[in-house]
Amino acid sequence: MVMPTHIVAVGGIVEDEYGNILLVKTHHGGWVFPGGQVEVGENLIDALSREIKEESGIDTDVSYLIGVYSNTGIHKGYDGVTDIPTKLMLDYVCKPVGGELCTSEETSDSRWVAKGEVLNMVIAPAIRTRYKAYLEFDGNVKYMEYKTEPTFEIKLNRTV
C-alpha cells in the first residue's frame, strides 16, 4: 500500500491589544496572515510560533484553535511542474508577546492592520474565507473543505 501524502500547515491570526491583526505580504500570495508548513518532527504549536517569527519578527503565544481546512484540489506548484497534494491547515488565534516587525525571504512587508481593514488587503479567496471564519468565531471550531485551483470553491462547510 502506498502511504498518502498530505501537507500539514498552520496559520496564525495574531491580534494585538488594540484589535489590530498581523499581516505579511508574500512574494506569491499577496497579503496573508502568517503561517506555513509543519516540518518533520515538529508539533503544531512550535511550527506556528516558528513560522510567525520567521515571516514577521513577532513572538507569539498560541491561544486556541478556530478552524481546520482541507484544500483537496491537487494543482501545480509555483514551478509549474510539481503537483501540490492535499493540504490540511489548522488556524489558531495568537497573542503577540514580543519581537519587532521585519521581513524575511518569504515576505516583502509585515504590518499591523485594523481588524476591519484586513479584508481590504487580503485578495486570496481561501485566506479571505478563513479570516471571515475568525471574525465569525463563536467558540465552535469550523471545518471546511475547499479547492483553490482552477477557481476557489467551498466543497464542505460545517462546525466540528
Image (tube, rainbow, N blue to C red):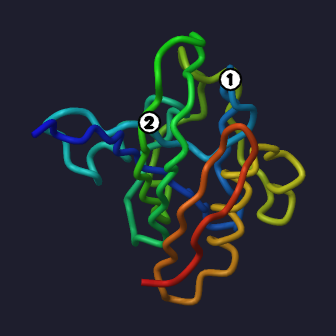
- Decide: is 59 above or below 77: below
Provide the secondary structure element on which disc 1 rests.
Answer: loop
Disc 1 marks which amino acid? His
When asked about the image quadrant of residue 1, the answer is: top left
Residue 116, percent from left and from top: 84, 65
Whole-angstrom CA distance, mark 1 to mark 2, is 19 Å
Of circles 1 and 2, which is in front?
Answer: 1
Residue positioned 49% across, 60% down in the render: 69
* The one of 85 and 17 positioned closer to us in this rendering: 85
Residue positioned 72% across, 37% down in the render: 150
Q: Residue furthest right?
A: 120
Up the image or down, 96 lies above or below 27; here it is below
- Residue 17 image position (x, y, % from top left): 62, 67
Crowd around label 1: few <14 · some 14–19 · many ≥20 (10 Å): few
Q: Secondary structure at mark 2?
A: helix
Q: Residue at x 41, y 70 (%)?
A: 65
Whole-percent x and y of residue 77? 55, 21
Residue in front for this viewpoint, 89 or 24: 89
Horizontal side of residue 71 vs 113, given as left or right = left
Residue lying at the far front in this picture: please name it.
Answer: 1
Rate crowding at label 2 as few (under 14), some (14 to 19) or many (20 or more) other CA atoms within 10 Å. Answer: many
Where does the C terminus fall, quadrant-wise?
A: bottom left
On the picture, is 52 further left or further right than 5?
Answer: right
Q: Which kind of residue does numbered mark 2 sit on?
A: Lys
User: Which disc number belongs to residue 53?
Assistant: 2
Residue 88 vs residue 13, the one in the foreground: 88
Residue tagged 1: 28
* Above-or-below relation of 126 to 66: above
Find the residue positioned furthest to the left.
1
